[in-house]
Image (cartoon, rainbow, N blue to C red):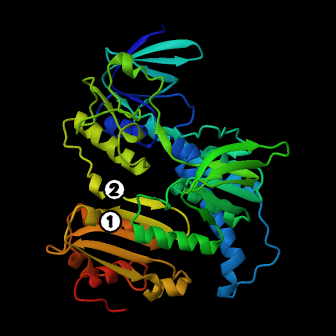
Amino acid sequence: MASEISYDLIVIGAGPGGYVAAIRAAQLGMKVACVEKDRTLGVTCLNVGCIPSKALLESSELYAQAKDKLKDHGVQVQGLALDLKKCMERKDQVVAQLTGGVASLFKKNKIDHILGSGQLNADHSVTVRQNKEETILKAKHVLIATGSSPINIPDVTVDGKSIIDSTGALALSKVPQKMIVIGGGYIGLELGSVYQRWGSQVTVLEALDRIVPAMDLEVGKAFQRVLQKQGIEFQLSTKVKKATVKKDGTVEVAVEDASGKAATLSADVVLVAIGRKANTEGLGLDKAGVKTDERGRIQVNEKFETSLKGVYAIGDVIAGPMLAHKAMEEGVAIAENLAGQAGHVNYDAIPSVVYTWPEVASVGITEEQAKERKLEYKAFKFPFMAVGKAIAMGEKEGFVKLIADKKTDRLLGAHILGARASDMIAELVLALEFKASAEDIARTCHSHPTLSEGVKEAALGLGSGTIHL
């Protein structure tokens, strides 16, 4: 035992939730330490998740534009070639810049970055282990923000070469001729899109009868049709039983359809992307008296406090969508609560995005949820093919779909399939946050020509009627 140091707040985990909580707490005058086993801050999101995947998505979309779209704009491209090594190097540079930025923010806000694995103790102390050395840290409050990791499938062993998880997909040395993606969620679709654009023949296997099941059904079906048009193949209601790596490095995948019929598929690379699980093992939760649910997630109250008073948890280790921005909002809220302020997260206004091209973004309830709750609602869909900017861009695929209360006109849900949906959704998140009506959105002046005019027109469609349709 090397020493004992005392803090106002110890954060275990330096992912989006953890590092944001640490920074906000320090800004509010607390003495803060952040325990993280990795040398680089940002953990999954910045190092092997959100940021590197978006860097590759951008690179692959530019390649696809040069290959398939620029000729429509009168731009002739000869000798087009993919330099995968350069793409990966650029991705690494982006990661390094952002993780370095977080380190600078820690320094600026006088936050101690403690390198090592943290274990919670019942007396609110945290044992940090690094290279067989132990340090005991003590604090008034402890925050667990250790994030999540990919879920594995029995009899499908990730080897990092032929069978990979999302981390492995960010560092392939060559583009596989055939890729099988197990899982039709946003991670599999995004990374599958990257390699499909670069020339892979991509097949997505999904156990359910639809992709991205949390998505509005109408949007999900249209989204699948768009991806199929791009060349991605789908086998829905298909369970993966086993994956075997052959001597030549290819992988045979044994599957079974809804009727029980067995089949075997072959690929050069198999990407396992069936979801993520909370990183709560090794934290000493049971011994410390912190309760978890049946999925290993930490149970918390409305103030993010666990069953052990003074110990809190946020992000992927608690219930709710595993989204970086959700964890960030919780990080700010917990820090402000500890400082005596009124930190709060409105879970009804948390957007979700799939960063394929076109993108899909949503916030609020789906039409299916409105029906399940027996709400009196109205819905309207405005196509991008009627938006001037979309036509000028050559991005006419998709639509804006809004759902509002039939009596009050209050916005209940918003769903966008189309170019730049990830940026457009912010307006609708704000509308939900401030309980705006469809008429409020419709009467808001939108610049012309912009894609966001599709939002205005969809809102008009919920009222007196559209102008451009």
Distance from disc 1 to disc 2, alpha carbons, whole Å, reads 18 Å
Amino acid marked by disc 2: Ile
* Residue labelled with disc 2: 350
**What residue is shown at x 51% (from left), y 82% (from top)?**
396
Is residue 366 shown to the viewer in this render?
no
Above or below, 186 relative to 304: below
Asked whether 2 or 316 is in front, the reply is 316
Image check: 120 left or right of 163? left
For residue 452, which numbered disc appears in the image?
none
Amino acid marked by disc 1: Glu
Q: How many marks?
A: 2
Farthest top residue in view: 1
Element type at mark 1: helix
Q: Earlier in the sequence, mark 1 or mark 2?
A: 2
Above or below, 334 relative to 345: above
> Residue 429: x, y in percent?
31, 63
Is residue 415 shown to the viewer in this render?
yes
**What residue is shown at x 35% (from left), y 33% (from top)?**
293
> Residue 80: x, y in percent?
79, 72
**What residue is shown at x 21% (from left), y 76% (from top)?**
440
Q: Residues within 10 Å of mark 2 (few under 14, many from 20)?
A: some
> Residue 59: x, y in percent?
65, 63
Above or below, 370 relative to 245: below
Asked whether disc 1 touches disc 2, contact meaning CB atoms under 8 Å apart, the reply is no
Asked whether 6 or 76 is in front, the reply is 76
* Residue labelled with disc 1: 368
